[in-house]
Image: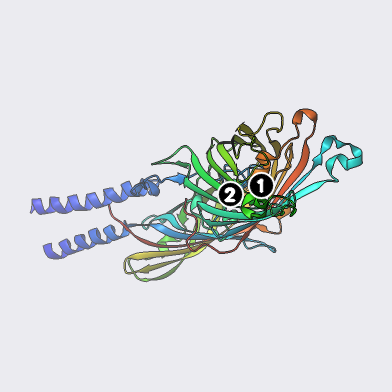
Amino acid sequence: MKRTSLSIILLIVFVNLFAQAKYFTKSGKIYFNASAKLEKVEATTRSAIAVVDSKTGKLQFAVMLKGFEFEKSLMQEHFNENYVESDKYPKSEFTGQIINNSEINYTKDGNYDAKVKGTITLHGVTKDVVASGKLSVKEGKLGLNAVFDILLSDFKIDIPGLVRENISNDTKITIECLMEPLKG
Amino acid sequence: MTKFRLTIAFLIVSCLMSTQGRSQQNDLLSLLPDNKPQKEHVTNAFKSTRVISGHSMEFLGPGVLDFRILHRFGPVNTGVQNLYGFDEAKMRIGLDYGIARNLMVGFGRSTLGKELDGFIKFRPVWQSRGPGSFPFSIVIVTSITLDPTKAPPVDTLKFQFYTSRLAFYNALIIGRKFSERFSLQLTPEMVHRNLVDSVLQSNDVYALGIGARFKISKRVAFVVDYHHILYGLKPGTYADPLSIGFDIETGGHVFQLHFSNSQGMNERALLLQTTDKWSNGAIRFGFNLSRVFTISKPKHTMKN
């Protein structure tokens, strides 16, 4: 009796421990594409920070805008100086929730569809967003792939008339992270 | 028995309690060990690699080619017959290339005197913020100009050497971006002419350049480019070149529209060949056009 109850209790403890795990990465990849008819406008950063709480499904990303690398250095300069004004607003953040977190089993290897809802803060403006993504659990690590669609105008990022055919207001942001358990 | 039960109870309670505590934490990001603040270089003190005619403290990105066309018209005070100077135009066509983040080269040819010029620009110190920051950028510019016109054969032998027609320009730019809206640079500079017209003239001319930018909007800035001759030219025979204008940036082009009393478009001509005065209204309209092309894409790009 003692032995069974002990093992049951230990099981509860262990399951709880696993379920409380937070996962994080400091080298998440974020790629955005605002290309239009006349020009390719895209950049990647490989130093995004992501944290997810597997118990609650709470999800947070943060990225330094100066970390976005473009092929053309002048485009990178314009991105920082004229569009996102990274001296004034150096960081962009996402805070939200995996809505279907209860459907995801973080202890079992596999791929899960994730629906994400939250707010993005960019250029000093915070806006609600929804996104769909995939969560993959493998060997204790968590992979997250998600795609967000945003309008730059929603964040007070103006595209002057002259370059309207070069830069698209409709921007696609793709996130790829491989997260590891956060200790402590 | 009781001890055992107590231990179990304690374990369960602590599990439940920590679950409660954690789900209440609002900011997950604060759980992560903090990143140390990093040193950040200051960019975009000036919109272009030239203030107007003189060099600025800015560089081209590595692998970037800048095609530059400069135009300087005639003096505005020559009246409507001369279309206020538009009838006379001198221009310089040139290419600048960024070799590394802190090294660039360029060459060009001016129709003013048909002069060729080439320069190397290097930045040993870059203004930065954060740990290990430095308040100024220090840039070294060195250039050579060549007047390709051979003197008529009647003249003495020494004019037949092309080296007689060379001049060397050296400058040290000390600049600072004070804020998003204001940048200022000081340029102690000198020109050495291999051969001067008379023994009374100095081969070396020293000057101090002052360049300033006032940003008016995201894409428009007001710039001033002034050089004060300190030594080497006879007073009354020259004027200090002063240029005032606007930089307008659109996509891959920068247009610089300005008024100046100098028609010189390379470093030597700017300092040594200015004779018109602002006080006479002998100012000239001019513009600089700059178009950048990315020649070689950087592999692991600009990390600030």
Q: Secondary structure at mark 2?
A: strand
Q: Residue at x 38, y 57 (%)?
A: A25
Nearest the viewer among B274 and B102 is B274
The residue that disc 2 covers is B143
Q: Quadrant of the N terminus of chain B?
A: bottom left
Q: Where in the figure is residue A42, as x and y percent of width and height?
A: 58, 61
Q: Where in the figure is residue B41, as x and y percent of width and height?
A: 48, 45
Q: Residue at x 67, y 39 (%)?
A: B198
Q: Quick check: A145 above or below B268?
A: below
Badge 2 crowding class, 10 Å Cα cut-off, few under 14, some 14 to 19, many 20 or more, is: many
Q: Is residue B44 left or right of residue B84?
A: left
Nearest the viewer among A84 and B236 is B236
Q: Residue at x 47, y 44 (%)?
A: B126
Q: Residue at x 19, y 52 (%)?
A: B11
Looking at the image, do the residues carrying marks 2 and 1 touch, with CB atoms under 8 Å apart? Answer: yes
**Subunit ID for the residue under disc 2:** B
Q: Quick check: B276 above or below B91?
A: above
Q: Is residue A152 left or right of residue B112?
A: left
Specify the quadrant of the image occupied by residue B83. top right
Q: Which mark is residue B266?
A: 1
Q: Which mark is residue B101?
A: none
Q: Where in the figure is residue B212, as x and y percent of width and height?
A: 61, 36
Q: Where in the figure is residue B141, as x and y percent of width and height?
A: 55, 46
Q: Amino acid at mark 2?
A: Ser
- The answer to whether residue A151 is visible is no
- Kindly report the distance in space between the C-alpha atoms of the residues bearing marks 2 and 1: 9 Å
Residue pushed farthest bottom?
A110
Q: Amino acid at mark 1?
A: Asn
